[in-house]
Amino acid sequence: MLYAPRAIRHFSLANAEARAQRTGRALARHAAPVRSRPDPAPAAPQRRVVVRLWLPMTLIFLLLAPFVFLFAPLIYLCTPPRYRTPPFATAVRLGAVLLSLGGTVVHVDTPEALVSIRIF
């Protein structure tokens, strides 16, 4: 073997490795082993549950409003004086909140289910 400085010896090894990678010999050393049995058939994808809800909040408010106004004085008497609010004004404000939710659309998308909620 001919004498060569250390830097040149390392360069020639790096050059040989790069050439082996380009020609594919390096890939043959790291190839996956051959299997004797074929892979099992892939499982069928699971179907997702799809839930679509339509909540008519305006209609619910109109149906429940008479009961709120009937029980307002009773609720007023049952609450401690420290927490009392005008019951009829509270019912109207709660109704305004329910009516302001109109047009809200909520989508929840997970791998198991798709849930869509529309509030009118």
Image: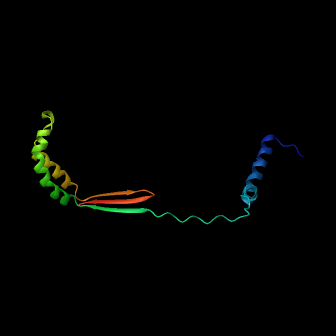
Quarter of the image where the C terminus is located: bottom left
Q: Position of residue 87 (x, y in %)?
A: 11, 44
Q: Position of residue 10 (x, y in %)?
A: 78, 44
| Image quadrant where residue 55 sits | bottom left
Give left or right: position of 102 versus 31.
left
Q: Position of residue 108 (x, y in %)?
A: 37, 56
86 to 53, vertically: above or below: above
Please name the residue shown 16% across and 52% down the image. 95
User: Who is closer to the viewer here, 9 or 60?
Assistant: 60
Q: Position of residue 68 (x, y in %)?
A: 14, 50
Please name the residue shown 12% across and 54% down the image. 66
User: Who is closer to the viewer here, 67 or 52?
Assistant: 67
| Image quadrant where residue 50 sits | bottom left
Give left or right: position of 108 versus 36.
left
Please name the residue shown 42% across and 62% down the image. 49
Q: How many tags in the picture? A: 0
